[in-house]
Amino acid sequence: MRHRSKATSRRRADIRHERLVDDLSRRGLLGFGVGIAVSGVVGSGQARAREAGQPHSLEAFFTPDAVVAAALSPGGDRVAVLRNISENSTRRLAVEVVDAADPTGPRRVVPVGDHEVETLAWANDRRVLMRLAIPVTAGGNVSIGSKLASRKISLHSRRMISVDLDTGDAVVLFGNERNRQRESLNLGAVIDYLPHDPDHVLMAAREYSGRLALHRVSVETGRASLVDTGNTNTLTWATREGVPVMRVDTNARGSMFNIFVRASEQGAWKRVWRQSIEQARSFFWIAPTERPGVALVAARLDGEDVMSIRELDLESLVFGPPRASRPGLDVSAPLLDARGNFMGGLFYAPRAQYDFVDGDMAAHHQAMNRFFDDECNVMLETADRARNRFVVHVTGPREPGAWYLYDKSARNFAYIGSRTGMETDRLGPIEVLAVPTRDGAVLEAFLTAPPSRLPGPLVALVHGGPEVRDIYDWDRQAQILAAQGWWVVQPNFRGSGGFGKAFAREGYRRWGERMQEDVEDAVAHAVRTHGLDAGRIAIMGSSYGGYAALMGAVMRPDLYKAAIAICGVGDLGDMLDYERRDDDSPDSYVYRLWVDRIGDPQTDRAMIEAASPRRRAAEIACPVLLVHGEDDGVVPVLQSRRMNDALKAAGKRVDYVEVSGAGHADWEDDIERSLMRRYVSLLATAFA
């Protein structure tokens, strides 16, 4: 997305460099005894703009990335930078090789060609692996009424290539298996980069039987040998020194994860966890420990409020006490070094923070945060074996993504490249709100202002899940809306995830009631504290957020002037019927999860119907835009079709867009761009 010239792309880093140098000259070392020198930023030297510039156009948010990815070699000597060097409508990618000892020096360029590259990682200190997404078209006959019709579906085939950055030679992994290459869509799943065996990686691939198998693949030749076989529902593994010790399967419908572990290659697989795919994670694998048969995982045990990092005995299935835990916050991800060893846990409070194993890393991380005025999420993306050099990925409300190289011993921060050339002062800043609710609680919400900061209309942008959360980070939808001169509020209402189980439970069986009221209270707080236009407010969201948009229009026809529901639920009763019908677990595990959260059709039918927008379509006063993927496996497309019918039958203003061949809001950028134009057009009309 959002490509500009290399010179423009570096301007923000140049401004930050000057700001940091000024700061160092005024205050000396940056906090906790850590000082950082900055290199790799050259340019105009102009002072930072104090006033907002002209907002970016909608189209600017969809231009190709300048830098796609960056990764540090295991030994810490080189950084591979995947760059888009498109010129004159010709798209070309290349890997730039940065000498970590001289990051401002010349870069050797290894051409990649005209490919869509999804991932970049080092296989060893000489070769990098890149996963390519290759467009393909599948077709067949489908039933439409009593007739058969031909239907074409656009898909992507994944392939992994290994590139020697010294010679430029490349091989396709599994490249010698012609039948597999011809028949398999996904040959791009690396399970383990095998730091103790740098000439091989472990990869997953489907066998002709339909079972997912694990293969040891040479990064030099691409040849593979079978290691282990799962079943037709196996999704992935985790390994210890190449031996599978954790496996994830789904049920037949694909609505639930079953997680199995074993202590050794000879051990029996035992189920240690299961959870609904549609709900927030309550368990994830981190890494093996130095002790055989013991791993690090993140889990929320029965009776506990938050997800914590802890040890798990793979034989007895006994969990140890928390090693990284914070009250009221779930751990989000681990930090690992090049050997796969645990370095710390990531939390959002509200920006990215780490609980480090090595205590002195906290001071280095805080110094890096100060470099970005404590406005960004500074993510330690890859670390070398010595834990001395790090590739740092920086994102934030006004930072779509940039990469830096941090040398801990030298205390040097070197700019590597940016995802886009979008200018900070032409984007909308975010403020963290503490929202008081009508019943005395206090919620977190994010308020994005237009670049001008001038008062105006407000859009409530509601997240999905509902047991996920919005974080303080780059959000393209919010920024596009802000570029139109509108404010955007994103509340973490009760029922959201990430704040512990007790907070999530505050939304159970309160759909269409407390959860909606929390959104309304966030809207009211933003209007009251920032002087916004109370007569021009709209609501939109995806998945659960789509439901909230529809239910908001039902409950507050006086408040919302437009509602945009993307892959939303219109009828909770129908949704529960869908979950019960398609739940193939022996004890209806997934269905019971949704009953706990929404209500029991046997005892709560009146409540469920009252909280279903389709049943109350006549109460909606504002124009509604419905968008749904034709092949949505999470919220069936029938939900939006029936909502559309109900609104039309009630004589309401409704527009319905069905995205062919798409799933649960997983459309490509060209479709998203087209849809964003429709969203902006509807809201502009409603706000006129």
Image: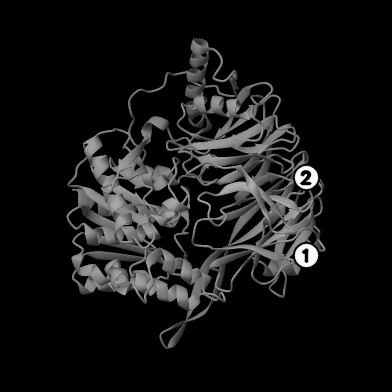
* Residue at the extreme bottom of the image, as rendered: 146
Label 1 CA crowd tier, 10 Å (few <14, some 14–19, many 20+):
some
State the SS at label 1.
strand
Residue 469 seen anywhere in this rendered image of the structure: yes
Which residue does the image show at 38% across and 55% down from the upper left?
Answer: 506
Relative vertical location of residue 92 with respect to residue 582 in this rendering, above or below? above
Residue 379 seen anywhere in this rendered image of the structure: no
Q: Which residue is mark 1?
A: 228
Mark 1 vs mark 2, foreground winner is: 2
State the SS at label 2.
loop
Q: Earlier in the sequence, mark 1 or mark 2?
A: 1
**Percent x, y of residue 328:** 47, 44
**Percent x, y of residue 572:** 35, 69
Relative vertical location of residue 11 with respect to residue 90 in this rendering, above or below? above
Q: Do callouts 1 and 2 mark residues in contact (Cβ within 8 Å)? A: no
Residue in the foreground of this view, choosing between 361 and 8 = 361
**Percent x, y of residue 641:** 34, 72
Q: Which mark is residue 290?
A: 2
